[in-house]
């Protein structure tokens, strides 16, 4: 825990230093600090990934994968759960969930065309 607090404090200090250097217009120094920040973050991600693998935390690994892909939080894990889930056992889906989804799509396409709403004609006042 102490290591994590020190890493976080170091990152905050580097962010403050990088912001000050950028405001002063020192681009090369800013780039060096930015590379160091990226290196620390990559090292922390590698440690976290290894720790999650040792724990067998599949959800945590999926959250990391989604963060690396810059997806909204939980997107990857929701997709993975949906992919691994057994097919639904709803009474309306007895033919099998894939066939039912396809047949529902075809039913929507086969609807008879709807008549456009008729406009009421206004009576002319005499």
Image: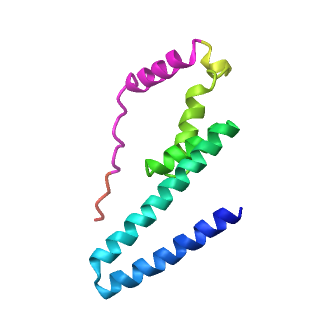
Q: Residue drawn at (51%, 18%), measured in percent from left and top? A: 98
The answer to whether one can see residue 82 in this image is yes
Picture coordinates of residue 21 (x, y %)? 36, 82
Q: Quadrant of the N terminus?
A: bottom right
Which one is nearer the viewer's eye here, 106 or 22?
A: 22
Extent of the magenta region? 95-120
Q: Is residue 115 left or right of residue 90?
A: left
Specify the quadrant of the image occupied by residue 93. top right
Which one is nearer the viewer's eye here, 98 or 46?
A: 46
Which one is nearer the viewer's eye here, 110 or 123?
A: 110
Q: With respect to residue 95, does 28 lie above or below?
A: below
Q: With respect to residue 49, does 104 lie above or below?
A: above
**Magenta segment: does it hold 77?**
no
Picture coordinates of residue 94 (x, y %)? 62, 14
Q: With respect to residue 4, does 94 lie above or below?
A: above
Q: Residue drawn at (70%, 65%), measured in percent from left and top? A: 2
């Amino acid at each position: 825990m102490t290591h994590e607090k020190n890493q976080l404090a170091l990152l905050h200090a580097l962010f403050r230093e990088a912001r000050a250097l950028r405001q002063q217009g020192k681009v090369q120094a800013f780039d060096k600090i930015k590379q160091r920040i990226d290196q620390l973050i990559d090292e922390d991600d590698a440690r976290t990934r290894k720790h999650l693998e040792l724990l067998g935390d599949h959800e945590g690994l999926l959250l990391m994968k989604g963060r690396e892909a810059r997806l909204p939080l939980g997107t990857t894990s929701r997709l993975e759960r949906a992919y691994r889930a057994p097919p639904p056992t709803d009474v309306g889906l007895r033919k099998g969930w894939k066939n039912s989804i396809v047949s529902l799509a075809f039913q929507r396409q086969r609807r008879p065309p709807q008549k456009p709403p008729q406009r009421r004609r206004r009576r002319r006042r005499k």
